[in-house]
């Protein structure tokens, strides 16, 4: 789904999942979404909306409530949040929208919509314990600062990741 789609196409009621909203709010951390009255204050104060005007927590909240399951879970926008907590500070209904997004991201990942860079980073962490590979340039910088060579080991990270089952999650293309 492209949240910024300019199309005036009407929402197809037959494509809506009436249970989607209750499925999301059945998670304790997202239950406050039931109190959302679409005031838009979260979007007005969102640090990401400032940079990407097409990103709107209010719109995503509304889409969840409407039951637009496939559109929401396949949206790249649910992965944009930086967890800055601005929405928590301003929401009159104490929704904490980043928590709702965490629930949506977990659901999206289980259904194969995780962005490919996310899956790539998971593989990298399992390999070395680091999110980015240590390259020669970094090694030289450490050397110049008289720091010892960095030794990384992904064994512990791999064990933890395997326990959570994250390693089995397939990534999907984001629209
Ligand atoms: S600020 Fe809170 S109540 Fe208003 S739209 Fe955002 S989540 Fe809903
Ligand atoms: S926590 Fe996420 S949704 Fe909330 S204001 Fe920050 S970037 Fe926006």
Image: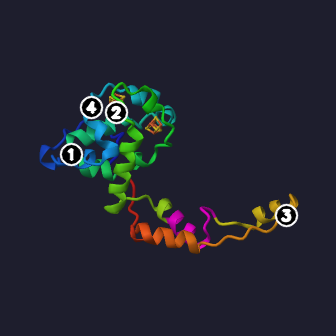
User: Judging from the image, what secondary structure is the residue with disc 2 in?
Assistant: helix
Q: Secondary structure at mark 4?
A: helix
Crowding at mark 3 (Cα within 10 Å: few <14, some 14-19, many 20+) = few
**Which residue, as the protein is rendered here, is positioned at the far left?**
14
Q: Is residue 105 above or below residue 150?
A: above
**On screen, 175 above or below 61?**
below
Main SS of residues in magenta: helix
- Magenta part of the protein: which range? 120-132
Mark pair 1, 2: CA separation: 17 Å
* Ligand 1 under 8 Å from disc 1 Cβ: no
In the rendering, at what x and y percent does residue 42 appear? 40, 30
Mark 4 / mark 1, whichever is N-terminal: 1
In primary-sequence order, the first of circles 3 and 1 is 1
Mark 2 is surrounded, within 10 Å at the Cα level, by few (under 14), some (14 to 19) or many (20 or more) other residues, namely many
Q: Which mark is residue 35?
A: 4
Confirm if mark 2 falls within 8 A of ligand 1.
yes
Residue assigned mark 1: 22
Specify whether residue 15 is in view: yes
Instruction: Decide if residue 78 is on the left or right side of residue 12.
Output: right
Residue position marked by numbered label 2 in the rendering: 58
Membership of 125 in magenta stretch: yes
> Residue beneath label 3, please?
143
Q: Are marks 3 and 2 in contact (CB under 8 Å)?
A: no
């Amino acid at each position: 789904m492209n949240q910024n789609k300019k199309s005036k196409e009407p929402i197809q009621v037959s494509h809506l999942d009436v249970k989607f909203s209750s499925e999301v709010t059945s998670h304790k951390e997202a239950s406050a979404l039931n109190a959302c009255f679409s005031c838009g204050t979260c979007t007005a104060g969102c640090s990401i909306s400032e940079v990407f005007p097409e990103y709107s927590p209010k719109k995503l909240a509304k889409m969840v409530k409407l039951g637009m399951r496939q559109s929401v879970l396949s949206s790249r926008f649910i992965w944009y949040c930086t967890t800055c907590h601005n929405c928590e500070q301003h929401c009159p209904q104490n929704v904490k929208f980043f928590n709702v997004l965490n629930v949506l991201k977990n659901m999206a990942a289980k259904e194969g919509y995780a962005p490919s860079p996310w899956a790539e980073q998971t593989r990298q962490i399992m390999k070395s314990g680091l999110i980015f590979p240590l390259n020669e340039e970094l090694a030289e910088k450490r050397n110049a600062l008289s720091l010892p060579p960095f030794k990384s080991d992904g064994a512990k990270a791999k064990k933890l990741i395997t326990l959570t089952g994250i390693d089995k999650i397939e990534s999907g293309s984001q629209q």
